[in-house]
Image (tube, rainbow, N blue to C red):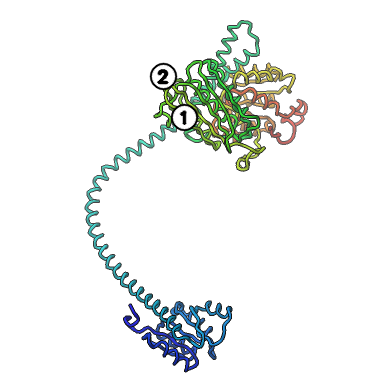
Amino acid sequence: MSVTEFEAKVGILLVDDQPQRLVAYRAILADLQLDLVCARSGREALEHLMDREFAVVLLDVSMPDMDGFEAAKLIHEHPRFERTPIIFVTGVHLDDLDRLKGYSLGAVDYVSVPIVPEILRSKVSVLVELYVKRKELQQANVRLSEANIALQEEKTRELERLNRSLQRANSELEAANQSLQSEIAERARIAQALKEADRHKDEFLAMLAHELRNPLAPIHNAIELMRLKPLADPQLNWARDVIARQLTSLTRLVDDLLDVSRITRGKINLTRQVVELEGLISRAVETVHPLFDEHRHQLTLELPEPGVRVFGDPTRLTQAIANVLGNAAKYTDAGGQILLSATARGEHVEISIRDNGIGIRPEMLPHVFELFTQLDRNDGRTQGGLGIGLALVQQLVQMHGGDVSATSAGPGTGSQFVIRLPLLREQGMPAAAAEEREPEPNLVAQAEPVMDGLPSAVEMASAVAPLVHAGAARMARRILIADDNNDALESLATLLELSGHEVFTATNGGTALQSAERHLPEIVLLDIGMPMLDGYEVAKRIRSQPWGQRITLVALTGWGQDSDRRRSREAGFDSHLVKPLDLETLTDLLARLPAKPTRSSAAANGGSGPVGAKPAVS
């Protein structure tokens, strides 16, 4: 659309205090067929602007009273005219600062006197054309808005029709929905029942583990007593070792039962420290060595150079490596070859365990790390166990920031498992791990990471030796043991007495409380589940007495979950040990106790021991 086709002439405001220039402007712009309005001052120009809209303002810079700069500022301060383009006309030379000032006030261009007609007409024509285009766009927007309104009305009518159809459909669906409500309620009931069953399952596993641990403790103590007494008959030695090995297997089965619950609830905790990789592998190999001997497997080790370290829980990492090694031993025929290699690659260390066993079918590979997955052997028989070892490996490795993978070319080709863990290159632990580290633990915290399982044969031997020589190497202690299981009570008491300690026993909570007050022991080993008074209540009552402030209280129980340890701390226990008792842990605990007070000093303090708070055992 041209200017002449626009519904009204486009207005141009000419502002100059010299009449001859205004005449010249009109003559130059006459051919453009514009509505040329003249003003001889800035104030008159503002009056014209208040009456109508102009496409362009041609403004003289040098005028009396109000110069062009001031007039331009006032024009663009008004919301209606802030977009009105201004061309400054100047008869003097302007420097860059003056031009910059003009542009900052809204000037779009400058023309100098004497004016070149063609230049002025060209600049005005461009600005007028832009003005016309803007007006056309505004009109198009108005038309578009009207079209949108019409479209919206049509859509509204269409929606009303659809709503009526939907209302009919909803009426039909309402009956169907009512029939579904009963099904939804039934599904909710089933889901709640499954949730409740899962909770009962966890409670059952914890109770089962507790009930199984109670008889394991006296059996374990009895084996240790048999080790202390030389047996002349080789068959008796063999029978004792058989019992020890089977007891270890049974204890691991109990631990597996607990790990099922811990995996499903995410309750596995880590006690991290800097660990030598070579030591981890050695302990893992030692754990599964009897299984390798039983199957006559040949194990080849390719260990990294000393100094390769990781930051993690040594017990749990050893467990993960041992589980993979045990899996390889179980699924490799007798006399098989198993290779364990460990190498540092970039920022990780890779532990590879390869065997020439039965292999894994391709459809089973994605499921080998799932709970309760067991592989079928070529002879159609399955291996024993609960099928949670590899699932536990995956969770433990992932908790350490690593990953584990399994590969196999198929049945009869063997398999390979690769554990990747973050490599610790610098001395000490990583900064991120340092931020996660908790404060230095006291006796309670230090006792928590104790393994729930029995020590190995080597660990048993190393634990028995300190107990046998404790009378000479370590101070004899006054110890009270309270347990309603007579076999566990008498066997542990006998072990400690043979180690040179003075031991008192009690078979229930009431007797334990009386014995503690009468004998003032340095340490009390309390079973939690005793009749009359349970271990928690006995601990609280001992702590409430002046004479009980300095006694070290140790919970000795089959309950080993985090909630059980927390409850022990709240009751006043200093440590929480899980049955069957780890002998080396107890020996170290006794060694950390402060020197015992004399009987005279205890009597001088009213039977309460030395004055002051009980020192922390660390």
Can you tell which quarter of the image residue 472 is in?
Answer: top right
Residue 569, position in %: x, y? 60, 34
Residue at coordinates 63% horizontally, 22% vertically from top-left? Answer: 583
- Camera-side residue of 34 and 279: 34
Q: Amino acid at mark 2?
A: Asn
Disc 2 designates what residue? 378
- Camera-side residue of 594 and 322: 322
Residue 136, position in %: x, y? 35, 75
Q: Is residue 566 visible?
A: no
Can you tell which quarter of the image residue 166 is in?
Answer: bottom left
* Kind of element beneath mark 2: loop
* Kind of element beneath mark 1: strand
Disc 1 designates what residue? 407
- Camera-side residue of 63 and 570: 63
Q: Quadrant of the N terminus?
A: bottom left
- Above-or-below relation of 104 to 327: below
